[in-house]
Image: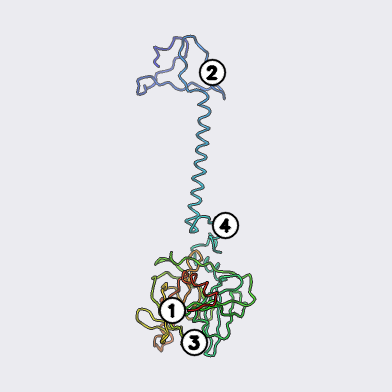
């Protein structure tokens, strides 16, 4: 509204301001006189004051703030869920004070070798198997609190007595529940055990080349040894001996058990009774005694059972200084283990 349209003397005269786009002068908002809406005297014939309705000026900001608060809460909740999924691998993961879902690895230490080792080591055991052919030492993974343990068939094959030592140093006698020589898997059960720490079986189908992994076992009888590395390859065809006597002769001599890979034989002769399975290849250091132990992802989940490793001293070398891991190890995928558990519990072998 221009000055010429205002009745003289009815409103105070304001200084001129730059015009809006429609050519009308811009006036500053009328001053506020206290907490309530401004009151104006009615003037006969005068146009209504050019100002927003008091009700809208009061209510709209509160409505806007309420809408913003609701939106912020929704976005904040979604962000928290997303952060939980990224940190713990899925929805429903607890905060940093809790554990990664389905495991005993704390959120604050997930992704670290020390965190994985601290959480999973109590569920890895040393297995000593005695037979007429000699003694063999390997490792195993506790999967139930009452003492079911997964290991390699070649660790306990032909054994007349099996002794299992926990990470705490306590020992148990174990019985063979079932074996599957074709997959080099076995299930043993401790006598009179309860309340044991258990490992979480993961998903080997989600494993990718380059993933960081941790291996825990009892190489050369050194219980609870932890090493780390990466997944070097997937679906490697590994051929192993099925014959109990052949396995025992190799283990009694202090070497690792024989296997074939890429057309070559390692650790001795696999004999005439063989089986081939798909394996995860890793460069994590594995040595005799790691067989039956765990290959673990950085969330503390078991992704494989360590089963074969190459040691130069077993390839015809007479130099004992050449013994040890050269970063060529293999593990049975945990999905194979999970698919075989029912048969192993039923005592079926193949």
The quarter of the picture where residue 328 lies is bottom left
- C-alpha distance separating marks 3 and 2: 103 Å
Whether residue 268 is visible: no
* Callout 4: SS: loop
Residue occupying image coordinates x 54% and y 63%:
103
- C-alpha distance separating marks 1 and 2: 91 Å
Question: Along the polypeptide, which appears first: circle 1 or circle 4?
Answer: 4
Question: Along the polypeptide, which appears first: circle 1 or circle 2?
Answer: 2
Q: Viewed as shown, does residue 204 lie left or right of 122?
A: left
Question: Along the polypeptide, which appears first: circle 2 or circle 4?
Answer: 2
Residue indicated by mark 3: 248
State the mark number for residue 309: 1
- C-alpha distance separating marks 1 and 3: 17 Å
The x, y position of residue 171, in whole percent, is 62, 79
* Callout 2: SS: loop
User: Is disc 3 in contact with disc 4, using a CB cutoff of under 8 Å?
Assistant: no
Q: Closer to the observer: label 3 or label 2? A: 3
State the mark number for residue 184: none
The x, y position of residue 243, in whole percent, is 46, 85
Neighbor class of circle 1 (other Cα within 10 Å; few <14, some 14-19, many 20+) is: many
Q: Closer to the observer: label 3 or label 4? A: 3
The quarter of the picture where residue 176 lies is bottom right
- C-alpha distance separating marks 1 and 4: 38 Å
Judge whether 193 appears above or below 63 on screen. below
Front-most of 111 and 264?
264
Residue indicated by mark 4: 97
Q: Closer to the observer: label 1 or label 2? A: 1
Whether residue 188 is visible: yes
Q: Closer to the observer: label 1 or label 3? A: 3
């Amino acid at each position: 509204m221009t000055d010429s349209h205002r009745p003289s003397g009815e409103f105070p005269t304001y200084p001129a301001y730059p015009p809006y786009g429609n050519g009308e002068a811009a006036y500053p908002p009328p001053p506020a006189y206290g907490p309530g809406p401004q009151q104006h005297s009615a003037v006969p014939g005068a146009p209504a004051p050019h100002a927003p309705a008091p009700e809208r000026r009061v209510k709209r900001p509160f409505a806007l703030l309420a809408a913003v608060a609701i939106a912020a809460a929704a976005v904040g909740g979604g962000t928290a869920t997303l952060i939980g999924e990224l940190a713990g691998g899925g929805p429903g993961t607890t905060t940093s004070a809790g554990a990664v879902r389905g495991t005993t690895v704390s959120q604050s230490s997930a992704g670290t070798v020390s965190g994985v080792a601290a959480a999973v080591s109590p569920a890895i055991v040393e297995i000593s198997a005695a037979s007429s052919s000699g003694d063999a030492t390997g490792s195993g993974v506790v999967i139930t609190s009452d003492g079911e343990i997964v290991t390699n068939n070649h660790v306990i094959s032909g054994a007349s007595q099996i002794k299992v030592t926990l990470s705490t140093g306590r020992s148990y006698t174990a019985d063979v529940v079932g074996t599957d020589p074709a997959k080099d898997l076995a299930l043993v059960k401790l006598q009179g055990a309860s309340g044991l720490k258990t490992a979480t079986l993961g998903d080997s189908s989600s494993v990718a080349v380059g993933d960081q992994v941790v291996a825990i076992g009892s190489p050369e009888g050194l219980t609870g040894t932890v090493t780390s590395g990466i997944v070097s390859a997937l679906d490697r065809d590994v051929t192993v001996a099925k014959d109990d006597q052949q396995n025992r002769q190799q283990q009694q001599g202090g070497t690792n058990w024989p296997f074939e890979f890429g057309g070559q034989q390692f650790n001795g002769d696999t004999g005439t009774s063989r089986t081939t399975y798909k394996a995860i290849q890793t460069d994590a250091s594995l040595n005799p005694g790691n067989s039956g132990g765990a290959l673990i992802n950085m969330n503390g989940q078991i992704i494989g059972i360590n089963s074969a490793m190459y040691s130069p001293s077993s390839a015809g070398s007479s130099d004992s200084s050449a013994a040890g891991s050269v970063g060529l190890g293999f593990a049975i995928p945990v999905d194979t283990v999970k698919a075989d558990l029912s048969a192993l519990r039923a005592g079926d072998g193949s």
